[in-house]
Image (spheres, rainbow, N blue to C red):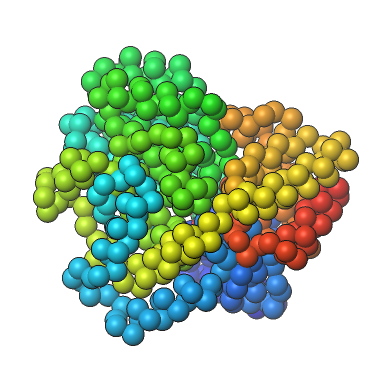
Amino acid sequence: MSPSESLFSRALQLIPGGVNSPVRAFRSVGGAPFFTKSAAGATLVTADGRELIDFVCTWGPAIHGHNHPRIKAAIAAALENGTSFGTPNPYEVEMAELIVSFFPSIRKVRLCNSGTEATMSAIRLARGFTKRDKIIKFAGCYHGHSDSLLIKAGSGALTHGHPDSAGIPAAFARETVVLPYNDTAAVDAAFAANPGKIACIIVEPYIGNVGFIKSDAGYLQHLRKACTANGALLIFDEVMTGFRLARGGVQQLEEIIPDLTCLGKIIGGGLPVGAFGGRVEIMDLLAPLGPVYQAGTLSGNPLAMAAGIASLKLIDELNPYAKLDQLGRQICLAALAAAKTKGLPLQAPQTGSMFSLFFTPTPVRDYETALTSDAKLFSRFFRSCLEGGVYLPPSAYESWFLSTAHEGAAIERACEVITRGIKSL
Ligand code: HOZ
């Protein structure tokens, strides 16, 4: 038995499915997950001593590559002072100042521990502010695993066949209106059918959880107008896209001002984190100022804040977006060229360092069209890439992520392996 196999067999005895988050399981692509011993730059080193070029980037946070020396040093320096205080600490203030400087729509921000907490709390806040109960979400968007949002959800919920999770009371599910993404008429119809009842729309402005999908031109602007016209709040879930696709996320690219924004991933520099923020009059409804309760023992944790501050400062120093976009395009063009040679239909939507390969002739613009992708073919492709030393998300319905550390030899090698993988299908 290899070290990974042995660890997995021990894990299976004690941890459901052997993993602490379903997206890490290999059930949809076949085989067992490897265990990671260490990571640096663009490379994971497995417990079995294999080096893999990593296109998961810890599901988004590692925009500067793994174990970046500046982030590591920031954590080490913070560690000297303690790991958690249960009182306000100076790092939280610096983080809040950085977030509002990157996101003009955010005037006040509350820090928490995960993207799930951020979206769950933003929904509660929207309901408290509007005094309405219903929310709109879109099929295939995944906003973490709180009850109101695990309905027609993407990510692991879809990958493992449970987009509508068991355990959600029907009364909760009734308050969530699920619509197709990129369909403006569906939004208008939902508001018309529920006058004065919709508290908010929550959307991944570009979806990263059913594979990567961009919004059609004008779609997000339509959501903004529809919310304003109907007295509902617009919540952008930029947990994945925030700081990754642009300094100020998709809202900067699309020039939209949402009422609330959810963040996570990059602002923790690889440690657990989440945040949500927006207009002052909405945010001031949060306890202790207002009646909407939200809390967390480890919220604003000094180590996570120190790591996140270092990560955001690196973004400002390096302005990595043009480079990341070029690397993303290079991978997608290599894949499309290989597919063309092979006569295989392939879609490769990409913005900057987020993209996906869908094995389908159908342009992918929503949940339904994402499901036309040949998941069995993806599994074979995944295994071929893994054998060649390239680790992709182990699901046909996840975005790939790049870091600045992927430039040079890593990207050349990955293009070769991906090309070979597609040609072998
Ligand atoms: N949004 C991430 C992947 N789509 C979540 C990662 C996880 O569920 O562990």
Where is residue 246? Give x, y as percent. Answer: 50, 48
- Examine the rendering and report whether any part of residue 26 can be seen: no
Front residue of this view, candidates 78 and 105: 105
Where is residue 395? Give x, y as percent. Answer: 62, 49
Give me the residue at 23% from left, 20% from top.
Answer: 196
Q: Is residue 213 left or right of residue 84?
A: right
Q: Is residue 294 left or right of residue 252?
A: left
Q: Residue furthest bottom?
A: 80
Give me the residue at 51% from left, 52% from top.
Answer: 244
Give me the residue at 28% from left, 28% from top.
Answer: 232
Counting the numbered discs, the total is 0
Q: Quadrant of residue 225?
A: top left
Where is residue 298? Give x, y as percent. Answer: 28, 67
Q: Quadrant of the N terminus?
A: bottom right
Give me the residue at 45% from left, 16% from top.
Answer: 185
Q: Residue furthest front?
A: 317
Image height of 220 relative to 292, above or below: above
Q: Is residue 281 left or right of residue 68?
A: left
Image height of 279 relative to 264, above or below: above
Front residue of this view, candidates 158 and 115: 115
Front residue of this view, candidates 147 and 214: 214
- Examine the rendering and report whether any part of residue 235 can be seen: yes
Where is residue 381? Give x, y as percent. Answer: 76, 50
